Amino acid sequence: MVSERQLEAIKGAKVLMVGAGGIGCELLKTLALSGFQDIHIIDMDTIEVSNLNRQFLFRQSHVGQSKAKVARDAVLKFRPQMSITAHHANVKDPKFNVEFFKQFNVVLNGLDNLDARRHVNRLCLAADVPLVESGTTGFLGQVTVHVKGKTECYECQPKPAPKTYPVCTITSTPSKFVHCIVWAKDLLFAKLFGDRNQENDLNVRSSDAASSSDHAEDVFVRRKDEDIDPYGRRIYDHVFGYNIEVASSNEETWKNRNRPKPIYSADVMPENLTEQNGNVAKNCVVDTSSVSAMASLGLKNPQDTWTLLESSRIFLEALKLFFAKREKEIGNLSFDKDDQLAVEFVTAAANIRAASFGISLHSLFEAKGIAGNIVHAVATTNAIIAGLIVIEAIKVLLKDTDKYRMTYCLEHITKKMLLMPVEPYEPNKSCYVCSETPLSLEINTSRSKLRDFVEKIVKAKLGINFPLIMHGSNLLYEVGDDLDEVEVANYAANLEKVLSQLPSPVTNGTMLTVEDLQQELTCNINIKHREEFDEEKEPDGMLLSGWTQAPPAKDDKQSMNDKQSIGNGGDSSNALQTEPADAVKDGEMEEISEPSGKKRKLSEGSKASILDATDGTRNHKEVEKLDDDDDDDVVMFDDLDSMTNKKKRLQ
Amino acid sequence: MDGEELTEQETALYDRQIRVWGADAQRRLSKSHILVCGMKGTVAEFCKNIVLAGVGSLTLMDDRVVTEEAWSANFLIPPDENVYGGKTIAEVCCDSLKDFNPMVRVSVEKGDLSSLDGEFYDKFDVVVVSCCSKLINEKCRKLSKRVAFYTVDCRDSCGEIFVDLQNHKYSKQKIEETIECQLQYPSFEEAISVPWRALPRKASKLYFALRGVFEEAEGRSPGEISIADLPAVLKLKKELCEANALNASHVTDSLLERLIIGTREFPPVCAVVGGILGQEVIKAISCKGEPLKNFFFFDVMDGKGVVEDVSNPKKESK
């Protein structure tokens, strides 16, 4: 039962909720019922139909409206006395600065991307406000507590980076359906319907660069008087026939792999072209959003797996419909999972490519999930997590430090538990975010430019998007609206200089300071000059240490052998790593680090991860406090190595 | 596999959850009929979850009038007398629940469930009651078709769920394979007759504590138990523990006191337990995924959500 003390704390609390989606709706409802009086919500999204299976504060009639505002209105209906302030905005907006965060007693996250979570983490640290983090995926969920100085911050333990694929796996040697999807979406779709000026790896493996790049330009652009049908077949034959034949001829590549089979439209669809023309003429749909190749061809069920023939028909029909009904958009289109025609095209193209490479074909439903990075979600897990968040929030308000728990909602019963609480850890002393320990960077200071440092280290790895870079008291680089022309030109020039040639030379032993003013984050980096870097293992020509990158998802052994990789999201540029935000931008990934072995131990034998606990490995034993009058059964995972290890449990 | 396809509307609305349990399971949900008796806060949470999941129909039973206690933990009841005045709890909740998913038929049934006959029970696939009744459980078990039976109770900062799926066949995923399994559940009466000494030593103390509380409460209307009954409950606990050769200190007096005094539900616990219950019912209807057997306990004090198998090992067929 809620004690007087708890009631007082709840009534007087000012709470910030970041996110009004799956977790957010459940959380706002539970906070309201629990007696909270003053809540601010930030969410930049608008409501979509696919939200309605779990974001129960929203109705069909609300589609298109602001989540934060509609959630507020819905809850005020059953708790009219509450003060709920809705911000339809991006939490990364500068107006949500440290001062803004300082007004709250606790911050509760219900976010769906890593980038925003890191941002909020840094602001909470700067404002010294406790943060309760959470995430759900299907039946899995977790709640974690982060209090500055007392527990780990959200970034003390590395979070898995979004999956990326080596460029040549996508362009030449796909082995899984997802490779075909990435090819269809980021290469073919982008080439045909996206920005013409964008660099594209589609014909990257041509043996003769000069002549074939000319050849490539001709192929993809529709000629002036070319009818749509021959154009479609020409594209089909080029990417599924000719390109495959060319790739197939390279002996080296196929030594240990099965050769792909070229597929030509005449072989798959030897039918009368004018028949297809007839279909389009009858299709008098004006509304572009309902234009669909599936509908045209009578393929109704998105759960059905198409044959090669059906996929080929859809491919040509979709291409035709884009040109017939949506010509204006061509050249500006980017893939959107809610664009039915785009999804049909990508599914069809991926399927044909899959057929070529002996990979199984997939249904539109499955393909859409992969292409759109869709995260599966149900109401029940969100409800459970929301309840657990409120429980932790109350402990935080009362500063009951020894009662804080990280709680995992498991899909399968483990040690008789479906909900497993674990004590939080002390802050990681080498965390560059909350401990201000300097990092080390090995880099060739005479070859690498400042731009490389900024893009590949500061932005990509450290997540600092608006950096200020200093060498001692010398400003090497900064961004901002208040810079004058001279400064902007100066910084632009600096970006192109190699480190040792900067106005304030950066050489071996230099200490650089990187700051983000909004996040109030300061990071010190010791520079160590190194001449050579392994092209395969260190393609960036840089090595950052003191910062642990979480292991990439399973089958990424190949990416080590390739210089470049492609992510399944964002653009197909040769970035080694797609920025986390891009990768999940068009998806709804509500991130969760699974308690099933994906956490890497920061030091040997120290960390008790959920995997160890559930495996019952030798390193850990479960100790239950014997209770006298105490009802507390504390689950403590003591490791036998703790004697020699400095890492301590939160006392 | 059922012949009917999901409609375009269903596919769009249920997309994210179909990705969790599949189209087949979604179809089964849309044909299922749920009966709920006793609309407390946790049950309201469960109802919200099950309506969002897209069941065929949900029937509510609760003839009590709306009071402050009712709407304090139940977000389906707006605290506005103009809205709830003159209506029963079930009626007000029904109006709110209909809104969550127009494809689910939500209705109210008046009367005392324990006095209704088999013909009534036969309309349903799942029965959920908020105070345990051996009688209702028995009625479910007497039918020729399987009716899944659940009880749920939350008091103070604890919650308990009891599950009886009788004979349940289901499939589960193990890496890439699908495995067919079967579980045999005892009735409520059978479960609580299992001698305490047969249970594991570390079995949840909530199990024992709540049995004591409920036995004292038996025959009396819900909410009638108060602090005045504490001495009687403590005495009962002592007797039960002695009879079962269980160390009395295993079930602390303070726990019992909490459970007697704290009859009000704590909203976060309603959300947690209502969520677990929702998941379990979905598993039972879809026959996908291993359902919990047969008790679930949650206590804010230790933060654990624990499953206890209280069944007579001799009777089980594994």
Image (cartoon, rainbow, N blue to C red):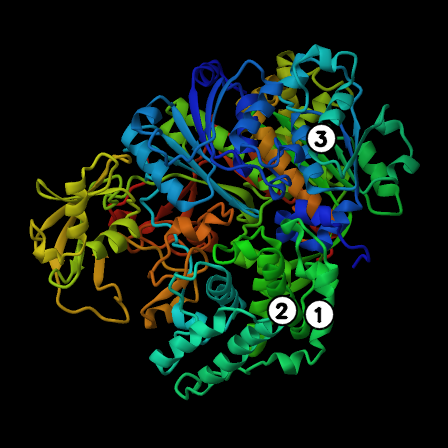
Asked whether the viewer can see residue B22, the reply is: yes
Q: Secondary structure at mark 3?
A: helix
Up-down relation of residue A586 to residue A434 (above or below): below
Q: Mark 3 is on which residue type?
A: Asp
Spatial CA span between label 1 and label 2 = 9 Å
The chain holding disc 3 is B
Q: Which mark is residue A276?
A: 1
Q: Residue at x 64, y 69 (%)?
A: A311
Q: Mark 2 is on which residue type?
A: Leu
Residue A606 spot, x, y in % from top left: 31, 51
The chain holding disc 1 is A
Residue extending farthest front:
A225
Up-down relation of residue B70 to residue A375 (above or below): above
Of A408 and A304, which appears nearest the observer? A304
- B55 left or right, relative to A78: right
- A544 left or right, relative to A322: left
Crowd tier of the residue under label 2, counting other residues whose Cα lies within 10 Å: few below 14, some 14–19, many 20 or above: many
Location of mark 2 (residue): A316
Is there CB contact under 8 Å for labels 1 and 2? yes
Q: Which mark is residue B99?
A: 3
- Quarter of the image with the N terminus of chain B in it: bottom right
Labels 1, 2: one chain? yes
Spatial CA span between label 2 and label 3 = 42 Å
Residue B51 spot, x, y in % from top left: 71, 37
Quarter occupied by residue A545: bottom left
Q: Nearer the viewer, mark 1 or mark 2?
A: 1
Labels 2, 3: one chain? no
Q: Mark 1 is on which residue type?
A: Gln
